[in-house]
Image (cartoon, rainbow, N blue to C red):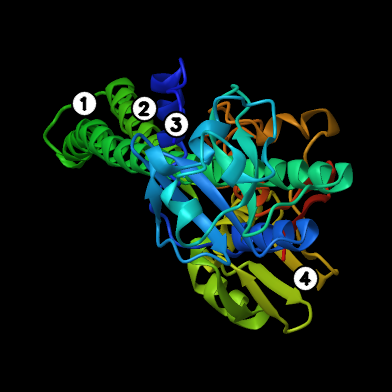
Amino acid sequence: MQLAAIPQNEHERLTTLHSYHILDTLPEKDFDDIVAIAAQICGTPMSHISIIDKDRNWLKSQIGLSLGEGTPRELSFCAHAINHPDEIMLVPDSTKDDRFHDNPYVVGAPFVNFYAGVPLVTGGGHALGTLCVLDTEPRHLSETQLASLRALANQVVSQLELRKKNRELALSKFAIQEINEELEKFAHVVAHDLKSPCNNFIGLADILLADANNNLTEDSKEIVNYISDSAKQLKQLIDDILKYSKTLNFSHDSTQDYSFEQLMQALRPMLQLPDTFELHYHGPNALISVSKAAMLQILLNFCTNAIRYNDKEHGTINILFSEETDYYVFSVADNGRGIHEADFERIFEPSFSTLKGTDRFNTLGQGIGLATVKRLVNKLGGEISITSKLGEGTTFHFTIAK
């Protein structure tokens, strides 16, 4: 019996092999099916997928054999096959082959007399193991059988590559999630540190203005009011930035089922609708399977803007809902100021500025809310658009994937 030579690139080959994390994994149907097909096509009673580790021939899948998890590398036919990655190794009759005639698996169970092995070669040229077929009798394979065996070996490599990519994606997703969680914690700390002085400015301004003995001139009072208003705007900006940043870590795992009516009933008390405003909604009371928190954030932003930037004495908000095959369809319409067509794209940019100036409460908006909404809608597999007429109102249309 002749021992197989160690490949010249053995260190690199083993490094590549271990990067697939295939060794000592449980049986998988995809690999078992390939082994069964290989045996059927070649008409052999035995077939297996072998992975050549440092000192063992580990079997990922096998049929017609009872070798447990594998054999010692020095007894393996496949250890010879990986030395010629571009060739199918054929042993028509092992009893007449100097390399194997006295091999324990030839003279004893499973009595391997015929062997054909196709190296499993990665894109980098490293042979990880083989897909092989075996028989207890001498035989030859046709060109069609050999071509089919090579094609099946390519499928084994494709499955290994797919497993590797899926594992890397899972690890990347986990790492990104950890990073996002740390960033969110950091953002909250920074926000707290920034909002504290804002609260101090607002408190001090209120004390100064409430003190009848402060002897402030009208000009001084105007300055104090300006400081207070600026601090309030900065505080609101910090809150809006936090909301926008949270959409980067939005997860679909929070999906739940609820009706359109239940969604509207949850939205109404959140709006704090002024006495001069009316909210109307219409649509089938169908089940919606999307994150309820995300849907409320989207609708609340549209409705809040419809209130804040409405210049009419009596305001109206109309929410329409319908279904298509693959999407939920919503629209939120108001009778407010309207938006110039030239600004349709800009309003969805996180520019931290507003196109609308002050609202009906004389507060300056920050322009972050619609950017947050657009990001959420896109993450939910939908699109958003706008129609508007100056002086008459605005309608936001958006879809959410089912």
Name the quadrant of the C terminus.
Answer: bottom right
**What SS does tag 4 mark?**
strand
For marks 3 and 2, the one nearer the N-term is 3
In this rendering, the label closer to the viewer, 4 or 3: 3
Evaluate whether residue 372 shows in this view.
no
Q: CA distance from mark 1 to mark 3?
A: 103 Å
Q: CA distance from mark 1 to mark 2?
A: 14 Å
Q: Nearer the viewer, residue 292 or 263?
A: 292
Quadrant of the image occupied by residue 329 = bottom right
In this rendering, the label closer to the viewer, 2 or 4: 4
For marks 2 and 4, the one nearer the N-term is 2
Q: Nearer the viewer, residue 371 or 341?
A: 371
In this rendering, the label closer to the viewer, 3 or 2: 3
Q: CA distance from mark 1 to mark 4?
A: 55 Å
Kind of residue at disc 2: Tyr
Q: CA distance from mark 4 to mark 3?
A: 76 Å
* Coordinates of residue 194 in the picture (x, y in percent): 26, 31
Q: Tell me: 4 left or right of 372.
A: left
Kind of residue at disc 3: Gln
Residue that label 2 marks? 226
Name the quadrant of the N terminus.
Answer: top left
How packed is label 4: few (under 14 Cα within 10 Å), some, or many (20 or more)?
some
Quick check: marks 4 and 3 in contact, CB under 8 Å? no
Q: Nearer the viewer, residue 148 or 161?
A: 148
* Coordinates of residue 51 in the picture (x, y in percent): 48, 43
On residue 2, the disc is 3
How packed is label 2: few (under 14 Cα within 10 Å), some, or many (20 or more)?
few
On residue 216, the disc is 1
* Coordinates of residue 140 in the picture (x, y in percent): 78, 47
* Coordinates of residue 237 in the picture (x, y in percent): 42, 35
For marks 1 and 4, the one nearer the N-term is 1
